[in-house]
Image (tube, grey):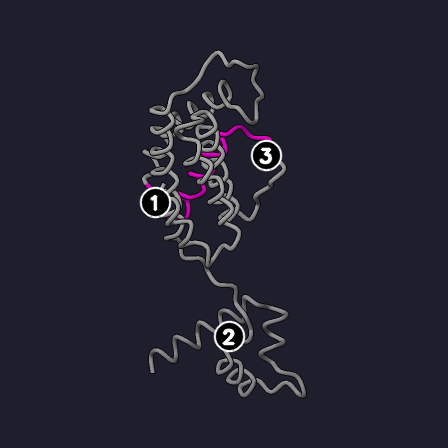
C-alpha cells in the first residue's frame, strides 16, 4: 500500500497523530496472504478511520459520540459529502458510487471478520488471498485519493496577534489609546474588525 503510506507520511507534519493509520496499513499487508479476513477487516477499519479523520477536520460540528453509532457506509458518504464541499478536486459522483463497494466490504467483514466478530472454529466461510489482495489494492487507491483531495484544501491559518507587528504598530500610531495598545485591544475584543483592518492595510501596501 505504497500510495497510502506515502500520503500519510506527507501529512504527518500537519497532523501528528495521523501516523496511527500506518499501524493499520501494516496489519493489512502483514495478513493479506496468511490471514485474508483479518486483512479485509483491517481495510474496512482503515477506510472508516480515514473517513472519520477527514470529516472531523472539515466539520466543526463533528460529534464523535454520534458518529461512532453510525454505520460504516453512512460515515463514508458523510465524509465524502463534507470533502466535496471543501475541495474542487474530488470527483464526487464517482466516489459516491464507490459507497456500494464500501457496503460490500462492510458486509464481508461482518460475515467473515476474525477480530471484531468472534467466529466459531472452523469458520464456514473463508476469503482467499486473491480476494484480500483485490480489497487491499482498492482500499489503497481509494484512501490515497481521498487523502490527496483532502491535502489540497487550503485551510485558513488562525490569526495570531504576533504575526503582524508592523500592522500592529501602524494601528497604534493611528489610534492613540493611552497606556494601552489599540491593536491588542481590537484584536482581543473584535477579531473580525481587526482582520478587516489588516486586509485593508495589506491592500494599501500592495497598491503602493
Element type at mark 1 = helix
Task: Give the image quarter of residue 154.
Answer: bottom left
* Residue at mark 1: 3
Instruction: Estimate the spatial distance between the alpha carbons at disc 2 and disc 3, rounded to whole Å.
Output: 38 Å
Give residue 68's mark: 3
> In the picture provided, is 47 more to the left or to the right than 62?
left
Q: How many residues crowd around disc 2 within 10 Å: few (fewer than 14), some, or many (20 or more)?
A: few
Give the secondary structure at mark 3: loop
Q: Is residue 189 left or right of residue 3?
A: right
Q: In the image as oriented, which residue stretches furthest toward the right?
A: 179
Residue displayed at 59% across by 72% down: 187
Check residue 163 in the rendering and tell me which mark sits there, or answer none. 2
The magenta segment is 67-90
- Majority secondary structure in the magenta region: helix
Is-magenta flag for residue 14? no
* Relative vertical location of residue 205 with respect to residue 111 in this rendering, above or below: below
Tag 2, which secondary structure? helix
Amino acid at each position: 500500500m505504497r500510495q497510502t503510506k506515502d500520503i500519510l507520511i506527507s501529512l504527518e507534519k500537519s497532523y501528528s497523530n495521523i501516523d496511527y493509520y500506518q499501524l493499520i496499513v501494516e496489519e493489512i499487508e502483514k495478513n493479506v496472504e496468511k490471514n485474508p479476513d483479518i486483512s479485509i477487516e483491517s481495510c474496512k477499519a482503515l477506510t472508516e478511520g480515514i473517513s472519520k479523520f477527514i470529516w472531523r477536520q472539515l466539520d466543526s460540528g463533528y460529534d464523535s459520540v454520534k458518529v461512532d453509532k453510525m454505520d460504516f457506509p453512512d460515515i463514508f458518504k458523510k465524509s465524502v459529502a463534507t470533502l466535496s464541499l471543501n475541495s474542487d478536486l474530488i470527483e464526487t459522483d464517482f466516489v459516491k458510487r464507490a459507497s456500494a463497494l464500501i457496503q460490500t466490504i462492510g458486509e464481508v467483514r461482518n460475515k467473515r471478520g476474525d477480530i471484531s466478530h468472534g467466529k466459531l472454529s472452523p469458520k464456514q466461510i473463508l476469503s482467499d488471498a486473491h480476494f484480500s489482495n483485490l480489497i487491499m489494492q482498492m482500499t489503497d487507491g481509494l484512501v490515497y485519493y481521498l487523502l490527496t483531495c483532502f491535502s489540497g484544501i487550503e485551510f485558513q491559518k488562525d490569526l495570531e496577534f504576533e504575526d503582524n507587528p508592523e500592522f500592529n504598530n501602524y494601528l497604534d500610531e493611528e489610534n492613540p489609546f493611552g497606556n494601552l495598545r489599540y491593536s491588542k485591544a481590537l484584536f482581543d475584543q473584535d477579531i473580525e474588525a481587526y482582520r478587516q483592518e489588516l486586509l485593508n492595510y495589506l491592500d494599501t501596501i500592495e497598491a503602493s
